[in-house]
Amino acid sequence: MYRVLYRKYRPRFFADVIGQPQVTDTLKNELKADRLAHAYLFTGSRGTGKTTCSKILSKAVNCLNPKDGDPCGECAICRGIDEGTLTDVVEIDAASNNGVDDIRLLREEANFTPAEAKYRVYIIDEVHMLSISAFNALLKTLEEPPAHVIFILATTEVHKLPATITSRCQRFDFHRISPEDIAKRLEYVCREEHTEIDHDAALLIAGIADGAMRDALSLLDQCMGQADKIDESTVRKTAGLADKSHLFDITDAILAKDAAKAVEITDELHKSSKDMARLCEELVGHFRAIMLIKTVRNPKDSIVMSESDFIRADKQAQDLSLPLVIKIMDTLQSAMERMFQGVNRRIEMEMTMIKLCGVQSESHTSPELERRLSALEKLVANIRSNPAAVQSAQPVKVVPPPIKRPSVDMDELRKNAVKFSEWHDIVEHLKQYSKSLGTSFDGSTAYVSGKYVLVDSKNDMCFELLRKPEHRTEVRDIIHQVTGKTYNLGRYSYPDEKKSDDPLIQLVSDMKAAGIPVEDKNQN
């Protein structure tokens, strides 16, 4: 009987597992040091090797002739596990055996010693599907398992597991496998199967698989049924994808605002039985590539694309602004959501093409802002092309408009002033910020009048320090922290202005020196 590729080429040793060194290296080291945990938790997206590593681990702990942390693959135990005939290794699908009775039966079986192997190993796949009562039944066994039992829990949704379960397991996270690693594995499988495959076709399969080796091998299996030599067109035909040229042509139509051309391409694809939702998804991926080209330093590391396609995508990226690319992607994703809500997919796609071809004339920004953004883009382009000119260019002086300050009526401030009871606490806080600033206010008092805090002190040093913007800002911030209110700062003025050293005169002088207009009814 024919065996599908993902089963035929399932790794039998840790060294064969692709793209998961953070898991395989650790497990091998633990096995060599004989430091086995009683429960393991394997988590990660589908097709990344969780079940494969579970079976390799179950062989390694029971192998009669282990080699450097790996199972030998030849002894009766290893062959029995590979063939599924060894009763001491039990694989349970939690999606269909998720009740409390299933777990109770497992607990009863776990008490019996292994029949042939050293350990009874329970592999519970999709463990997040267990019910709450089933998790509670499993908890006690996980906490104090028999010495001859090892649990391996596998899940794609670790966030659904109770913390009481995860805390009793040694957790391993499986990453999505990189497109290059998947492509290399596909090329190896094709050599073993005497089938030719282009590197670009292998990369395309890897991109469709989205980091899942099992999905990649399944798609390769289908492609092998189509042709003996697999290229990009074979993969696209098998997967039901639009040819990349159509994606570029649609983008060119959007750039040219040619709605008729975009709808015509969509109609041709529909007649070829292309799914419109899939086409919409591919266009999102295409504009994602353009977005990354415009924003990422090394976009090739994040894009699965042939060199010729990358050159063409790079050219299109130069003709599109980043805000427009994001707007197009948002429009496509909204259309895709509506397609899955039951609307006519062909009509929705045609409407979307017309929207996209007119999206450049629709803008939420004013014409003046668009003009300035365009000028900025040209300036950045000139800087990139001629950086030496930037160094020799003269700086542009920007003169800020004058600030109109409101006049202050000192009579009114004096008349309404009340003693500021929190001032002592504020001075103590100031000392934590700056010892010199806080100490300069020792012996001072303050008064509140409207939106002003007026400081009364015989030490002129504090007022000299307050002339510095950073100190003045800090005092106002501390006042706000203590009182929850924001005040302006000033120097307190005594009612008797006939004294030569009248603080009011000093305040007026200080405010005039600071450029603040003062209206004083008593000043001649």
Image (cartoon, rainbow, N blue to C red):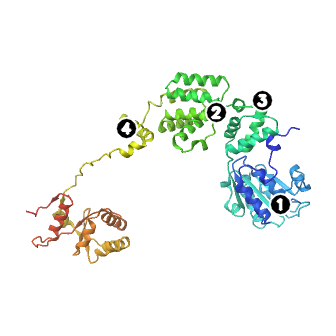
Where in the figure is residue 478, as x and y percent of width and height?
A: 35, 67
Which label was assigned to residue 227? 3
Discs 1/2, front:
1
Marked residue nearer the N-terminal end (3 or 1) = 1
Give the distance between the C-alpha atoms of the residues marked 3 and 1, in whole angstroms: 42 Å
Q: Examine the rendered structure and indicate whether residue 307 appears above or below residue 354.
A: below
Instruction: Give the residue number, with chain letter if any, for mark 4.
Output: 372
> How far is disc 4 from disc 2 in space, using C-alphas?
38 Å
Q: Name the residue located 28 percent from the left edge and 64 percent from the top edge.
A: 468
Please tell me which residue lies in front, 358 or 194.
194
Provide the residue designation for mark 2: 278
Q: Residues within 10 Å of mark 4 (few under 14, many from 20)?
A: few
The amino acid pointed to by label 1 is Val
State which tag comes first along the sequence, 1 or 4.
1
Q: Position of residue 471 (x, y in %)?
A: 31, 66
The amino acid pointed to by label 4 is Arg
Judging by the rendered image, the residue that carries numbered circle 1 is 61
The answer for how far apart the CA atoms under marks 1 and 2 are is 45 Å
Residue at the (57%, 32%) spot, across then down = 312
| Residues at marks 4 and 3, CA–CA distance in whole angstroms | 55 Å
Is the C-beta separation of discs 1 and 2 under 8 Å?
no
Amino acid found under the numbered disc labelled 3: Ala
Per the image, label 3 sits on a secondary structure element best described as loop
